[in-house]
Amino acid sequence: MPKIVDHQVRREEIAEALWRVVRRDGVGAATVRSIAAEAGWSPSALRHYFSTQTELLAFAMEHVITRVRARIETTVFQGPVRVAIRALLEQLLPMDAERRAEAEVWLQLTARAQGDPAAADWLRRANDGTGEVAAIAVRALADEGELAAHRDAEFEAARLHALIDGLSVHVLTRPESMPPDRMSAVLAAHLEDLAT
């Protein structure tokens, strides 16, 4: 009887191998050969799942999105709206080892995608996901009376998106200056300011 292979699990194993290569050696080292070696596969076996390097990088970025979405969907957000919104937004920030790994891979793949027109679609989709969470957060604040009447919700969602991106980059480039509790405090202060 032939062995039954779960192709989605295999693709996720490859994405995890790519993550390890990118985190250890940088995105420039993420070749089919190095990723295959990291996964314990032959390059030809890896090409069975991903015919191009761009396709592989796109899947790795999709893997980040899937992980974040799953974490958000399985987390119960409770308490006053600002507390719950802060907890939601912290799911997008490098607050622990898992989220830091996601952010490191994310940043390097984003830099790599800038020079690859074929990667523009997944880069846009990923960026839209963060923007959507920021917009949901601002709408929730507005619905609960926690967004000052003079504030424009669309503008504030864009500003919140920029804060999330900025905090992530800041933490990755200077982790000692922005430990998780400080990051959380910056985010809390911003949410509080939106009510004034």
Image: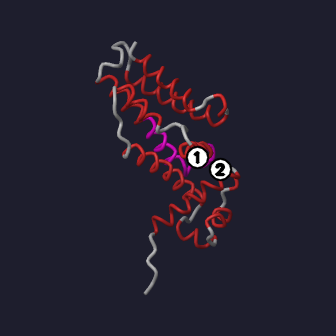
Residue sitting at x 29%, y 23%: 144
Q: Are marks 2 and 1 in contact (CB under 8 Å)?
A: yes
Using the numbered discs, state the Cα–Cα distance from disc 2 to disc 1 in whole angstroms: 7 Å
Q: Which residue in the structure is indicated by mark 1? A: 101
Where 162 sits versus 123, above or below? above
Left or right of 123, for residue 154: left
Residue sitting at x 68%, y 62%: 34
Residue sitting at x 57%, y 35%: 168
Q: Specify the quadrant of the image occupied by residue 146.
A: top left
Q: Which residues are magenta?
A: 111-131
Where 145 sits versus 71, above or below? above
Residue 41 on image: x %, y %:
61, 71
The secondary structure type at the circle numbered 1 is helix
**Camera-side residue of 102 and 97:** 97
Which quadrant is the C terminus positioned in?
Answer: top left
**Camera-side residue of 161 and 93:** 93
Tell me the kind of residue under disc 2.
Arg
Q: What mark, if any, has residue 23 been given in the picture?
A: 2
Where 13 sits versus 90, above or below? below
